[in-house]
Image: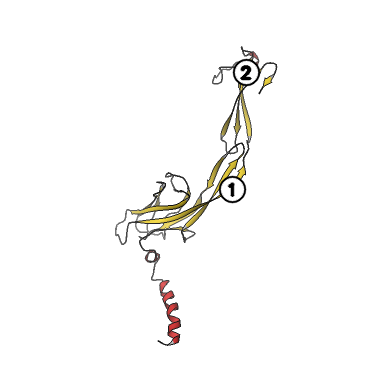
Amino acid sequence: MDPLTMLAAPLIAQMNLWSPGLNETSIMGKEGEFLQRSQPIQQLTLMRMIYRGDCPGESVKPIKGISFLAAMPPAGNQRIVIRNRRTGGYTNREYGSGRRRAESFSINLGDRHHGSFLSVSPGENEFRWSVTKARNVDGPTKGNAMLMVNTEDRERYRNFRSIDEDAFCPGEEYSSSRTPLGECSNGYFKVKRQGICPDGSKIELGMQTVYRRYRSW
């Protein structure tokens, strides 16, 4: 083999690898893979907000527009079920003719099925996919997939939006016909306080006793 041919051989092999005749499923083998913006991914990072202050808690922003491509290509009226072996959550998406990949879905932390959301846990997640309603089977209808999930934590202080007070005579908290506060028979009334968080959730702040001439907190 002459030197020019030897130099060209690796380039020719690379061109053959990505030739139009070699589709995505033949590269992928029997495994499935997740796609983001039509590109294969092996890991994702979810943003988790941790709240401090009056209204502690946390929230996670889901990642939208995720799709999936199995070893068996879309066809007919097929659907594909992608189930997380770690969390038990799953999503059932369209996978029929006219599609290049599964109907898109969102990924979020969790442990249950929730419509178009696929639940995951931090760390390595193993999935089992299965194609249903397949007719002319030309490939495996079941397989596995892996996805590494990372979390990036941020902190923010979240204080009460407002504080609500409900005043009533003793024993009349749930009464539809309350006695005027100035006429409470025991000479005092009760005040129940609740803190209202920005998301609408409520935190009980306890009960206070208010006497006619002065207020005791």
Query: Which disc number belongs to residue 154?
Result: 1
> On the rendered image, what quadrant is the C terminus found in?
top right
Residue 45 to residue 27: above or below: above
Q: Say what secondary structure mark 2 lies in.
A: strand
Q: Residue furthest front?
A: 123
Residue sitting at x 37%, y 56%: 144
- Would residue 1 appear left or right of 214 to someone viewing this image? left
Residue 159 to residue 67: above or below: above
| Mark before the other along the chain sequence, 2 or 1 | 1
Disc 2 residue type? Phe
Residue 117: percent from the left, percent from the top? Answer: 45, 48
Task: Identify the image's colour scheme: rainbow, by chain, secondary structure or one colour.
Answer: secondary structure
Question: What number of labels is visible?
Answer: 2
Q: Say what secondary structure mark 1 lies in.
A: strand
Which of the 4 quarters of the picture holds residue 51?
A: top right
Residue 163 to residue 74: above or below: above
Residue 134: percent from the left, percent from the top? Answer: 31, 56
Which of the 4 quarters of the picture holds residue 197?
A: top right
Residue sitting at x 62%, y 29%: 164
Q: Residue furthest top?
A: 185
Query: Which disc number belongs to residue 189?
Result: 2
> On the rendered image, what quadrant is the N terminus found in?
bottom left
Foreground residue, 174 or 206?
206
Disc 1 residue type? Arg
Residue sitting at x 53%, y 46%: 60
Q: Residue furthest left?
A: 136
Report whether residue 19 is seen. Answer: no
Q: In 3D space, how far apart are the residues under numbered discs 2 and 1 (Cα atoms)?
A: 43 Å
- Would residue 15 appear left or right of 51 to someone viewing this image? left
Residue 201: percent from the left, percent from the top? Answer: 56, 35
